[in-house]
Amino acid sequence: MLGPLNLKINREVLVMIGPAGSGKTTLLNLIAGMTRPDGGSVILDGSDITELPLESRRIGYVFQSPNLFPHLNVYDNIIFGVANRDRQNKSDYVKKLLDEMGLSHLSNRGVQGLSGGEMQKVSIARMLVVEPRIILLDEPLVHLDPSIRRKLRLELRRILKRQDIPAIYVTHYEDDVYALADSVAVLHNGRIENAGRLEEILSSNSSPFISEIMEESNYIEGIVVESKNGIAVIRVGLHLLKTLGEYSLKSRVGILIRPEEILLSKDAIKTSARNVIKVKVAGIREIANMADVQLRADSLYLRCRITSEARAELSLMENDQIYAIFKATSPQVVREES
């Protein structure tokens, strides 16, 4: 059962999250015209498209699996949806897409030998070449290996922002929200439980589902102030964090740090870890045999998860001044904005 619901999206990337069976894919299918609503309207660019057939809506849809044509090469798969009379005019645009997505060298290659990430890139390019008025993505990265998924998310965010049209990305993964979202909508039991800008959703406790999945990582945004020899330095408030990788100077990046990768010490010990930050214990919450420790250093907030035994050994109490320590491999850059 889906609805009743009311959702408006502007020229932005809206990430829709919710538990399995909450109606996320059904909502995309309603917008695309693959499913007919029992009531209400679907409005696109001010026009009612509720009764418009699927093929007339100019809606881009990317599915979990690429569904490419095995007998066609990369170029022909991309241009397949373009009418024959328009193909010559689209040739330069296809070449531009191939170049932007790092597929130029695969243009004449058969799709059966491509990696999962490459196949999904071809699927995205095929969707873009028809110049859709809105983009729908139903967990297109879910079947990819984690390392490929991280890399492709960065590229996908840039691609979607460059299009400057509404895009709805469905997921139930926390990392996708941080990496892709301008706005977030929480769908639960067929209804929109919460919706707003990413920063509003992250600071909101009004949705149990948000609390459940969005407390898993530390999400931090900062500015790249140095990047060389495979190490990037990111300024976050008064602090400098180091992470592996090279990124554009002055770009704004979003990074994730898993709570369990942060070590705590009462002393500023010598360590090979690149990040050592003096912090204050802002709160401690016991969960089973674990302690969830809230840390603060000026405008920087971190969550750390340690065993109750480790907390006892440290004699850790609220308001203690301690050190948070983590390696340069711990921060994972999930988005980069010029």
Image: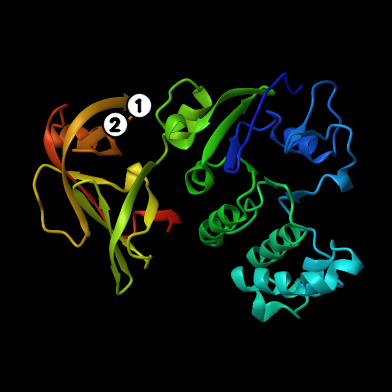
Q: Report how far apart the C-alphas of labels 1 and 2 lie in the structure.
A: 6 Å
Tell me the SS state at disc 1: strand
Q: Amino acid at mark 1?
A: Ile
Q: Residue at x 33, y 30 (%)?
A: 289
Q: Residue at x 11, y 42 (%)?
A: 266
Q: Could you tell me residue 153's position as x and y percent? A: 54, 55
Horizontal side of residue 336 vs 221, given as left or right = right
Q: Are dots 1 and 2 in contact, CB under 8 Å?
A: yes
Quadrant where the N terminus sits is top right
Q: Is residue 188 above or below residue 60?
A: above
Q: Could you tell me residue 16's position as x and y percent? A: 61, 36
Residue underneath mark 2: 291
Q: Classify mark 2: residues with Cα within 10 Å, few (<14), some (14-19) or many (20+).
A: some
As rendered, which of 293 and 222 lies closer to the eye? 222
Which label is found at residue 287? 1
Horizontal side of residue 102 vs 218, given as left or right = right
How is the protein colored in the picture? rainbow
Q: Classify mark 1: residues with Cα within 10 Å, few (<14), some (14-19) or many (20+).
A: few
Q: Amino acid at mark 2?
A: Ala
Q: Residue at x 78, y 76 (%)?
A: 110
Tell me the SS state at disc 2: strand
Q: Could you tell me residue 177's position as x and y percent? A: 52, 42
Quadrant where the C terminus sits is bottom left
Q: Residue at x 71, y 50 (%)?
A: 64
Q: Place residue 39 in its image quadrant.
A: top right
As rendered, which of 254 and 58 lies closer to the eye? 58
Q: Is residue 36 above or below residue 258?
A: above
